[in-house]
């Protein structure tokens, strides 16, 4: 317990340091695990590592789906789905061809099936890395890039997982491997069953939570946690893709009205960070640092990692997005750049170890080093690259945080007072607002107060407005020249 407490404390402090210097916090969590694994802790359980990773990935994918608003995803669902499926397959094929060709040059003989297996473990972008970096930076992205990247990273793990499992079967024919035809059929069935199961379990979760009427509100988080694990395990039991089911369950839950939704969101935000820290610490403890420092491993990892960042990922993105003309070349370049790798490739690389595939240790070490390279090169430049390509804008934080009862239908908005709003007068009563509309509170230079009709308004004041006339209020804002309207409910 003492060691565990120290690990968590050091990881949190490392996360604060990482944020200050613009580095991904998850990279330092991984580094803390490696540091403790050198001399203090002896840990080499691949079964426990895989189990912890599975639990953590379920929570991460569910929370990512829960935080994704379908209204934001709807316009980019087609390119997001293509990136999450065809993009993953193309990345794996392009990278595998390179690995197969370059491995002999560094003194490693590797069949194409093993090269493709290695590439498949690293083919998906990591949702934990993408979610944490994009949301911590508070940087807005043009052309709907943020929901696109989050949708891709949250939904492409199942494809990489299926490819990894199928290729392990092909690489281990004596262990009951399946053929290519049966493998493809298995893949289609798994994805279809996973999607349907995730949707149905998500709807069941919403129905149960809204009707169970628990006296202890804290138990709603426990109940939803049970649905997350049930979604994964039940779907896996009926031969579906559990990871896809968990993500879709999160989408369903997050886009429906839910009792105690604010409480659930806060709980799972903190719990997701906890499981991310535990997962990265565990992976850092598991790796053997001596094996990483072998010359052939270092050289192959550097070549594969750089090729993945600068060639394989961009080529897959440009090919996948070729039918979608809405994205500019700069947007495609940015999507290519934010193809971060994180814990997922390392976790998937433990599956060949469990199956005792030839060269499984080499595959794991290369995936581990490539992940570190990706987090260092790409993770530290997420905001800088967006600024360089002219795709970023400052994302305004809400001045008000309000939690309304789920049954209330009134809309809450936050607007900043501009000069046009004060053209007819500077007091609140002189601002023309629709009926059944009320300014509840004003924020001025960080101070909050309840206004009266005679309250003098200033340019830059933030108004918290509640209304039953959403359409009329939106037209009023438009007439006042107010474009920056933040919906809070």
Image (spheres, helix red, strand yellow):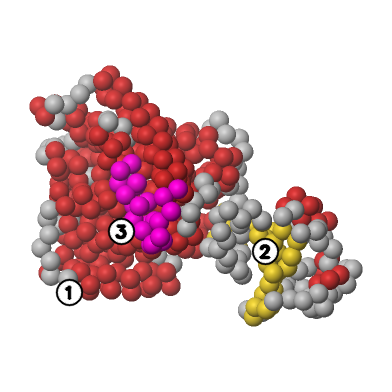
Residue tagged 3 = 275
Q: CA distance from mark 1 to mark 2?
A: 46 Å
Q: Which segment is the magenta one?
A: 211-231
Residue that carries the numbered disc 1 in the rendered image: 2
**Contact (Cβ within 8 Å) of mark 3 with mark 1:** no
Question: Counting other residues with Cα less than 10 Å from the Cα at mark 2, is it few (<14), some (14-19), or many (20 or more)?
Answer: many
Q: Specify which label sits upstream in the sequence, 1 or 2.
A: 1
Q: Position of residue 227 (x, y in %)?
A: 34, 46
- Which residue is depicted at the point 38% across and 72% down? 16
- Give the crowd class for mark 3: few <14, some 14-19, many >=20 residues within 10 Å: some
Relative to 442, 137 lies left or right: left
Disc 3 secondary structure class: helix
Mark 2 or mark 3, earlier in chain: 3
Residue closer to the observer: 134 or 206: 206
Q: Which residue is the extreme one toward the right? A: 424
Q: Please check the rendered image and state whether residue 226 is part of the magenta-colored stretch, yes or no.
A: yes
Question: Do the residues bearing badges 2 and 3 touch, measured as CB atoms within 8 Å?
Answer: no
Q: Is residue 91 visible?
A: no
Q: Quadrant of the N terminus?
A: bottom left
User: Residue drawn at (36%, 43%), measured in percent from left and top?
Assistant: 246
Q: Is 230 a magenta residue?
A: yes
Q: Quadrant of residue 34?
A: bottom left
Q: To which residue does mark 2 refer?
A: 414
Q: Circle 1 — which element? A: helix
- The main secondary structure of the magenta stretch is helix
């Amino acid at each position: 317990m003492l060691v565990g407490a120290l690990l968590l404390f050091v990881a949190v402090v490392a996360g604060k340091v990482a944020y200050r210097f613009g580095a991904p916090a998850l990279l330092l969590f991984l580094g803390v695990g490696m540091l403790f694994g050198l001399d203090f802790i002896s840990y080499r359980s691949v079964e426990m590592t895989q189990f912890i990773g599975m639990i953590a990935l379920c929570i991460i994918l569910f929370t990512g789906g829960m935080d994704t608003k379908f209204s934001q995803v709807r316009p980019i669902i087609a390119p997001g789905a293509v990136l999450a499926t065809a993009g993953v397959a193309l990345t794996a094929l392009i990278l595998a061809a390179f690995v197969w060709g370059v491995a002999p040059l560094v003194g490693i003989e590797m069949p194409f099936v093993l090269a493709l297996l290695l590439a498949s473990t690293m083919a998906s972008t990591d949702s934990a890395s993408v979610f944490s970096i994009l949301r911590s930076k508070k940087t807005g992205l043009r052309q709907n890039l943020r929901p696109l990247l989050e949708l891709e990273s949250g939904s492409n793990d199942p494809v990489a997982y299926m490819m990894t499992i199928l290729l392990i079967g092909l690489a281990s024919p004596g262990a009951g491997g399946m053929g290519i035809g049966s493998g493809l059929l298995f893949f289609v069935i798994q994805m279809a069953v996973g999607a349907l199961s995730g949707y149905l379990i998500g709807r069941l979760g919403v129905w149960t939570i809204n009707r169970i009427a628990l006296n202890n509100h804290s138990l709603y988080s426990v109940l939803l946690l049970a649905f997350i694990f049930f979604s994964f395990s039940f779907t896996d039991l009926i031969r579906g893709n559990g990871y896809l089911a968990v993500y879709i369950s999160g989408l369903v839950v997050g886009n429906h009205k839910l009792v105690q939704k604010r409480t659930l969101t806060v709980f799972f935000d903190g719990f997701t960070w906890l499981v991310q820290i535990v997962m990265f610490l565990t992976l850092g403890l598991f790796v053997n640092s001596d094996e990483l420092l072998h010359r052939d491993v270092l050289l192959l990892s550097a070549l594969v990692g750089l090729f993945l960042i600068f060639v394989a990922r961009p080529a897959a993105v440009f090919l996948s997005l070729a039918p979608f003309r809405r994205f500019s070349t700069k947007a495609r370049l940015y999507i290519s750049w934010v193809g971060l790798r994180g814990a997922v490739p390392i976790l998937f690389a433990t599956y060949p170890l469990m199956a005792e595939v030839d060269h499984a240790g080499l595959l794991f070490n290369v995936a581990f080093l490539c992940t570190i390279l990706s987090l260092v090169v790409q993770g530290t430049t997420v905001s800088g690259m967006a600024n360089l390509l002219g795709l970023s804008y400052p994302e305004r934080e809400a001045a008000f945080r309000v939690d309304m009862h789920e049954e209330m239908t009134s809309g809450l908005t936050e607007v900043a007072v501009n000069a046009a709003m004060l053209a007819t007068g500077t007091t609140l009563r002189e601002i023309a607002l629709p009926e059944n509309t009320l300014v509840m509170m004003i924020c001025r230079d960080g101070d909050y107060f309840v206004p009266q009709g005679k309250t003098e308004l200033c340019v830059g004041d933030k108004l918290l407005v509640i209304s039953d006339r959403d359409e009329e209020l939106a037209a009023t804002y438009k007439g006042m020249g107010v474009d920056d309207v933040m919906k809070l409910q």
